[in-house]
Amino acid sequence: MFIHFSKYQKNMTSEKLAEFRAKGMLLDPKFDRLAVIGDKKKEKLFNFDKNKYIIGYMWCDKDGNSLKNGCVTFNQKNIFSTFNFTENALKKNCDITIYSSDTNEEIIKKKIKITKIDELIELDLNKLFQKSNLLINNFKIKVTVDKEKYSSTSNSEIIKNWEVLKIHYVIFIPEIMNKLKWYNAEKVQKEWFNNNGSNYPWESEPRLNFYDFNWALEFDRFKKHFNKNFDTWKSEKSINSLKVEIHKMIKEKYVIKPLPIQRLHSEYLKMTIN
């Protein structure tokens, strides 16, 4: 369905936008900009001054869609931000500074020439990772056009999710494991991040699809302990304990108890006769 952009310009807010999208309408990212303006007008953070240049910005994906809860997700290599300007800002220079709102350290500086009112800028996620010492970090952007400056000051949770980028560095663990050549650990960690870490969501134990006994024997410490204790399991106590566990598995139908050889033979004869 074709939607007239101008029809929804007046009094658009993030709440109204959420209602429309729940009905399958206004899915184009450009309507996020209207909602940003509407929310800021509501908080009296923005007014349409003819000399104003900057409306705001929003962390987003490559298609201009806002990030869920403002968080970077696993497998996301780069991060984007869309900057919203008034027409007065066209052809002017803009200085962009990305900084940690936790430490105030400036991480990335960038200068752009404004060619349209919605500028989508790609930023290097690895730089944010490499220059931070925190496990969880929040990033904001300072925007400057001429002498006008803009930074995130909103108290709205919705606007915070647009303007504050949250990075939990645990998502980079598979890359670190790869660099250390821990390839099996990397595969398991990726499975976990992709929600494939267990057979069912309610299971607490992860699947270990990439591990086998031969892999474990590659490690000297494990191999030494294994060789030392190879025959110790044959004690009467161990065998009785093993029997208890096998009976439990049969009772809970995890395994089927093998039939005696005579019975197997008779069952086979019945099948062949029939």
Image (cartoon, rainbow, N blue to C red):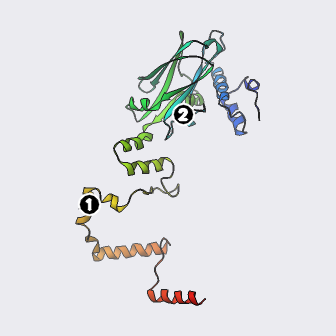
Q: CA distance from mark 2 to mark 1?
A: 46 Å
* Residue 91 appears left or right of 23: left
- Which is nearer the eye, 147 or 43? 147
Q: Is residue 224 above or below residue 136?
A: below
The location of residue 41, given as percent across then percent down, is 65, 20
Q: How many marks?
A: 2
- Which is nearer the eye, 29 or 180? 180
- Mark 2, mark 1: which one is toward the viewer? 1
Q: Secondary structure at mark 1?
A: helix
Residue occupying image coordinates x 57% and y 29%: 162
- Which amino acid, by three-letter code, is at mark 1? Lys
Q: Which residue is mark 2?
A: 70
* Residue 181 appears left or right of 158: left
* Residue 85 appears left or right of 247: right
The location of residue 171, given as percent across then percent down, is 45, 41
Q: Is residue 10 above or below residue 203?
A: above
Q: Is residue 273 above or below residue 140?
A: below
Give the label on residue 223, or none. Answer: 1
Q: Quadrant of the C terminus?
A: bottom right
Please tell me how crowded label 1 is: few (under 14), some (14-19), or many (20+) other residues with Cα within 10 Å. Answer: some
- Which amino acid, by three-letter code, is at mark 2? Gly
Q: Quadrant of the N terminus?
A: top right
Q: Secondary structure at mark 2?
A: helix
